[in-house]
Amino acid sequence: MSADVRGLPITVANDEALAAYEEAVAGYLAQKPDTMDHLDAALGADPEFVMARCLKVYLLKMAFDPAFLPAARECLDTARKAAGGATDRERRHVSAARFLLDDRAVDVLATLDGIAIDHPTDLMTLKLTQFLHFWRGDAANMRDVIGRALHAWDPDTPGYGFVLGMLSFGFEEGGDYEAAERTGREAVDLNPEDSWAVHAVAHTIEMEGRHADGIEWLKRTEADWLGNNNFRFHLWWHRSLYHLERNEIDEVLDLYDTGVRGEKTDFTTDIANGAALLWRLALRGADVGHRWEELGERAEAHVRDAANTFFSTNYMMALLATDRREAVEDLLAAIRKGSARNDPIASRAVDAGVALSEALRAFHDGDYGAAVDLVMPVRYNLHLFGGSHAQRDVFDQTLVLAAVRSGRESLARALIAERETRHRQVPAAWKAEVGMAAH
């Protein structure tokens, strides 16, 4: 029986396959563009490598693109056939991969949480489990899946810096900003290539409204994440948010053109980054020119995917901005029909996503009162379809402006005051429209 770099038993045919798998796991944690190449090399050296098969299933499914699902199911079939001689941990991963492909969120998380408890140095499991809790809007478990494993780690354990980076993001989404920044900076000091830790610190700075600090942080670390996969576009998106809050519109548009959408990819997160940034600019009255058009085309191509409610709401922005009304209706139908309703959280997430999408349409059409009425009953359920606080903030901004523009002065004043208690900058124009003194 072989063992991985942290001593966990692993069923593998040869050292070549194991070495390539270790590179793939490290690449997955570090957002490297050659992660799948290493994984394919591992499977080339050992086609029945169960853990490599499971990781490939996870990566293909978590890309949120239905085009990858046939390959994922084929990969899972091979893993299931090879699992007879595998360890208990590996067989549980095969079950988790099957649950994931079948959209059985409760079962996959119960399985992965169990693996992480029994095998706390299974680094890939910690990363994947936190990511899946993220898409369920479960900030407590994003933090605690890492916290439960810390007893098995120390600075000499390979991958320790990655664990701190994940813990930092869990702290941030849970609202413990001091711990998040301290832990994230320690993670980056240990492992400068850990762009997830860079990202966690960027989120913390955003939540505290320290925009100049955020720009400096991302500029200072940029050399270490320029070689990332598409995640680098998301980090430029974060930097754009800082500039937007400083009303540096030209800088935002330049970052959009050269970074956020410097490559016109078809990846779900990249489309969402672009749409959410342009929508924010539109809320500030900025002229974004022709930039919506390519996003609208890409969003329209994905309207029937219904792979993730969060991404669907971001596609909605691009469809509305480019007046693709038939596609808007198709997207709403796909959200209702295609999203899993096999547990109460998934059902509430879908309902919130439908209401939000209809609210975005009402806002775009100038029916600001209807937008308010649609969002207010579900605003505390929006986290259930995933995304971070920073990503979902565009919906809060839309609600505030809808309240302002619909003449609901008391509600607008209350929402602005609420926003300020969360240390988020509020545009002076919004305050002026409801008669609030700038401060």
Image (tube, rainbow, N blue to C red):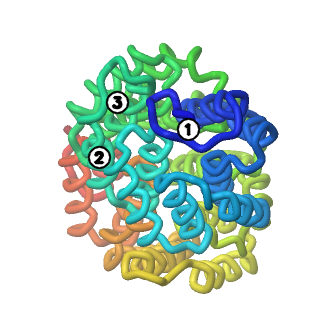
- Name the residue: 29% across, 34% down: 152
Question: Which residue is the site of mark 3?
Answer: 164
Q: Which mark is residue 143?
A: 2
- Name the residue: 63% across, 22% down: 226
Q: Which mark is residue 88?
A: none
Residue toward you, 420 or 187? 187
Q: Amino acid at mark 2?
A: Arg
What is the spatial separation of the Cα atoms under label 2 and label 1, in whole angstroms?
A: 33 Å
Where is residue 353? Give x, y as percent: 49, 74
Q: Nearer the viewer, mark 1 or mark 3?
A: 1
Residue 316 picture quarter: bottom right
Q: Is residue 194 above or below residue 100?
A: above
Circle 2 sits in a helix, a strand or a loop, which is it?
Answer: helix
- Name the residue: 39% across, 37% down: 121
What is the spatial separation of the Cα atoms under label 3 and label 2, in whole angstroms?
A: 11 Å
Q: Marks 2 and 1: CB-CB under 8 Å?
A: no
- Give the class, few, some or many, for how many residues have Cα within 10 Å of label 3's Cα (few <14, many ≥20): many
Along the polypeptide, which appears first: circle 3 or circle 2? 2
Where is residue 125? Give x, y as percent: 46, 47
Question: Which residue is the site of mark 1?
Answer: 1
- Give the class, few, some or many, for how many residues have Cα within 10 Å of label 1's Cα (few <14, many ≥20): few
Q: Amino acid at mark 1?
A: Met
Residue 113 picture quarter: bottom left
Where is residue 120? Give x, y as percent: 35, 42
Confirm whether residue 67 shows in the render: no
Q: Amino acid at mark 3?
A: Leu
Q: Is residue 274 above or below residue 357?
A: above
Q: Is residue 348 above or below residue 236?
A: below
Circle 1 sits in a helix, a strand or a loop, which is it?
Answer: loop
Along the polypeptide, which appears first: circle 2 or circle 1? 1
Where is residue 298? Give x, y as percent: 77, 58
